[in-house]
Image (cartoon, helix red, strand yellow):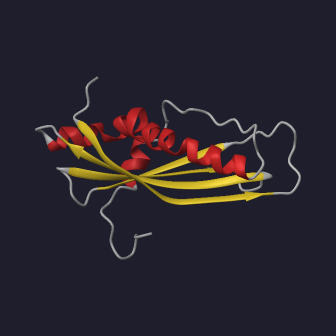
Amino acid sequence: MIYQFEPRNIFLIKLEFSREPELPENLQLEIQAQGKVFWDAYPTRFQAKMRIRTTPSAPFSFKMEAVGLFDYTGTDPEEGKKLIPEYLNNYGFPLLWSSYLPVIKGIAANMDINALTLPLISRFSLDPKELLNLAEPPTESNKE
């Protein structure tokens, strides 16, 4: 499928790391992802925020937040809006993740974690209803 969205910019908002002095030889990380869409400038543009983190109790953990700005290039904004979750799961969020994966690996290497294996996630499975339910325009009560 050809989507009528074009990535405009991506930004790293937050990157946090923690490490215990002793790490297991085979470090296994569980990665959790969340997404949120903001509609302020739709139909011409929308903003998608992605959070990825490891389980906080892991001996090495990180938390990353990134934002992507995407332009809508189609002619039917309502139809385009329906395709945003699918587009983000297939292209938008993998783009954000893969853009900052080398940064995460580089910082981990500087923390003496050289054999860190993180997946190259080619498709996310975030629930479209959850993405869209969280996607109300920001107000004073729901701004983060």
The quadrant in which residue 57 appears is bottom right
| Of the pair 122 and 128, the residue shown nearer to us | 122
With 43 as the anchor, is 114 left or right in this view?
right
Name of the residue lying farthest toward the front: 110
Q: Visible in this render: residue 54?
A: no
Q: Position of residue 78 (x, y in %)?
A: 18, 43
Query: Residue pushed farthest top?
Result: 1
Task: Give the residue at x 43% y 39%.
Answer: 95
Q: Residue at x 49, y 36 (%)?
A: 124
Give the residue displayed 56% in from the left and 32% down from the top. 120
52 and 15: which is toward the camera: 15
- In-image side of 93 versus 111 (left or right): left
Location of residue 29 in the rendering, given as x and y in whole percent from the top left corner: 72, 42
Instruction: Choose between 63 and 56: the one closer to the eye.
Output: 63
Q: What's the residue at 25%, 25% (across, down)?
A: 2
Residue 98, x across and y down, in percent: 50, 38
Q: Is residue 85 visible?
A: yes
Q: Eyeballing the image, is 40 above or below 143?
A: above
Residue furthest toward the bottom? 140
